[in-house]
Image (tube, rainbow, N blue to C red):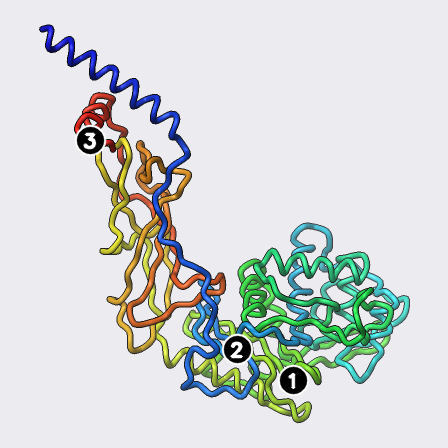
């Protein structure tokens, strides 16, 4: 009896110690993480594809997986592809209720004057005439109207300078760290008259890398997929109040235009052309339900009729669809290499995990889906002593899978070299009682 009382007293002391220790350590420990570092892209991911452009990239529009890259991190002029950022900020303002599509705005003097320059892509805006946000937005995206872009910038930002500052801030928010922004339309700073950005040279122009341009397009399609309703318009008219301008989309890969290709149903986004930029094109295509984003910078531009950027884009898109297999990763998938996570103070010492949501990965035709392997990391906020803290509910998101492929390098727009997926529990785990916890402490199995 004395031995029992002594053992009971010892157990109570241990339990108290465990309780105090648990409180003191709460929130400090976390499961160790096999970190996936930001990887610089190689100069060219596949030397077998010869694109006659300065830089290029192809990206999955769902996951940001990079399927091809050539000089993709080199910062270069982007010309009128800048209008994708202007469109993003207009769509944002409409969503936030700061603008409405039927709202009529008066273009400022700088926008009105630029719109009259017939050497540039434009719809003429009359002095003192108001135009709906929607009509200017359509003119900007379909016909690359430079004055219309500036009119929208003035409506969103109040001034051209304020709008450019907004472009710069939004770029950083998107993860675009090395870019230059001076105009809302992509013209050189000195070409927008009184709308030029103060303190910058007249030759200053908007610049991004192909990768960053892909980030901009990726973010736009994620946040405002309705942009495709406009970028897919091949032809339409603009009414400036006294006359109409017939607008044909500069994206000649659209159905019914010069470089349309039935096998590649392109529906956006934006071209860009200047002496310094050459011919550029940020495109998107949805083939068999699998959407890609491509960017080509610095294609040849011998004349207004030069089709080089579209030919290079078609070549890049075809390469992706022909060289890769689109592979679905289902929700509730379990990886043999990452089936469980350890549990602290649970009735069970581990818990099964699987994928929370379905996603996809592009695998080279030489690689099998059996080559997928994964590691799993617990959310630090849910852990103690490097383990998930019980109790744990079934179906709870508790961590992250990092999926890699044997025999294939992976690259993503966020700099990762693995596919990231949320991990959830396959069952619940109750907390162990104090006696079990104490006994594990005595035996050195302090779970």
- Circles 1, 3 touching at the beta carbon (< 8 Å): no
Residue 263, relative to residue 373: is it above or below? Answer: below
Q: Which badge, 2 or 3, is on the more N-terminal residue?
A: 2
Instruction: Kindly identify which numbered label has been placed on residue 136.
Output: none
**Residue linked to disc 2:** 71
Specify the farthest residue to the right. Answer: 128
The picture quadrant where one finds residue 148 is bottom right
Return the x and y of residue 231 as percentages of the image width and height. 61, 72
Return the x and y of residue 293 as percentages of the image width and height. 51, 72
Specify the farthest residue to the top. Answer: 2
Q: Residue at x 71, y 80 (%)?
A: 247
Instruction: Choose between 400 and 385: the one closer to the eye.
Output: 385
**Residue linked to disc 1:** 278
- 210 lies left or right of 181: left
Return the x and y of residue 246 as percentages of the image width and height. 73, 81
Instruction: Kindly identify which numbered label has been placed on residue 444.
Output: 3
Residue 295, relative to residue 359: is it above or below? Answer: below
The picture quadrant where one finds residue 299 is bottom right
Instruction: Choose between 47 and 446: the one closer to the eye.
Output: 446
Q: Quadrant of the C terminus?
A: top left
- 339 lies left or right of 251: left
Element type at marker 1? strand
Element type at marker 2? loop
Return the x and y of residue 123 as percentages of the image width and height. 78, 76
What separation in Å lies between label 1 and label 3 (alpha carbons)? Answer: 69 Å
Q: Circle 2: is it few (<14), some (14-19), or many (20+) Cα within 10 Å?
A: many
What separation in Å lies between label 1 and label 2 (alpha carbons)? Answer: 16 Å
Residue 312, relative to residue 33: is it above or below? Answer: below
């Amino acid at each position: 009896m004395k031995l029992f009382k002594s053992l009971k007293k010892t157990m109570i002391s241990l339990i108290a110690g465990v309780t105090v220790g648990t409180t003191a350590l709460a929130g400090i420990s976390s499961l160790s993480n096999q970190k996936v570092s930001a990887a610089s892209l190689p100069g060219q991911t596949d030397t077998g594809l010869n694109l006659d452009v300065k830089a290029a990239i192809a990206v999955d529009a769902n996951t940001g997986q990079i399927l091809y890259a050539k000089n993709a991190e080199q910062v270069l002029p982007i010309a009128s592809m800048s209008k994708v950022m202007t469109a993003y900020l207009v769509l944002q303002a409409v969503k936030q209720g700061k603008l409405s599509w039927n709202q009529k705005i008066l273009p400022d003097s700088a926008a009105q004057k630029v719109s009259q320059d017939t050497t540039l892509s434009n719809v003429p805006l009359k002095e003192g005439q108001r135009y709906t946000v929607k009509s200017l937005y359509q003119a900007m995206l379909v016909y690359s109207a430079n004055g219309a872009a500036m009119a929208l910038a003035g409506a969103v930002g109040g001034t051209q300078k304020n709008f450019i500052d907004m472009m710069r801030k939004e770029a950083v928010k998107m993860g675009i760290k090395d870019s230059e922004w001076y105009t809302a339309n992509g013209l050189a700073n000195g070409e927008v008259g009184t709308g030029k950005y103060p303190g910058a040279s007249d030759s200053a122009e908007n610049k991004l890398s192909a990768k960053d341009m892909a980030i901009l397009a990726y973010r736009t399609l994620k946040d405002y997929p309705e942009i495709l309703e406009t970028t897919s318009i091949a032809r339409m008219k603009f009414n400036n109040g006294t006359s109409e301008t017939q607008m044909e989309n500069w994206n000649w890969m659209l159905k019914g235009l010069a470089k349309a290709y039935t096998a590649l149903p392109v529906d956006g986004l934006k071209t860009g052309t200047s002496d310094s930029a050459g011919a550029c094109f940020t495109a998107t295509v949805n083939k068999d339900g699998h959407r890609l984003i491509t960017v080509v910078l610095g294609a040849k531009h011998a004349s207004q009729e030069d089709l080089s950027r579209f030919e290079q884009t078609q070549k890049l898109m075809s390469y992706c669809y022909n060289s890769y297999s689109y592979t679905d990763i289902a929700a509730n998938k379990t990886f043999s290499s990452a089936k469980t996570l350890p549990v602290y103070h649970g009735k069970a010492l581990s818990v099964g995990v699987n994928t929370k949501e379905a996603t996809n990965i592009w695998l080279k035709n030489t690689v099998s889906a059996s080559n997928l392997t994964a590691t799993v990391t617990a959310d630090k906020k849910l852990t103690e002593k490097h383990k998930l803290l019980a109790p744990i509910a079934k179906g709870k998101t508790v961590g992250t899978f990092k999926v890699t492929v044997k025999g294939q390098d992976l690259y993503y727009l966020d700099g990762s070299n693995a596919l990231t997926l949320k991990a959830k529990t396959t069952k619940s785990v109750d907390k162990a009682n104090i006696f079990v916890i104490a006994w594990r402490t005595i035996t050195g199995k302090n779970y």
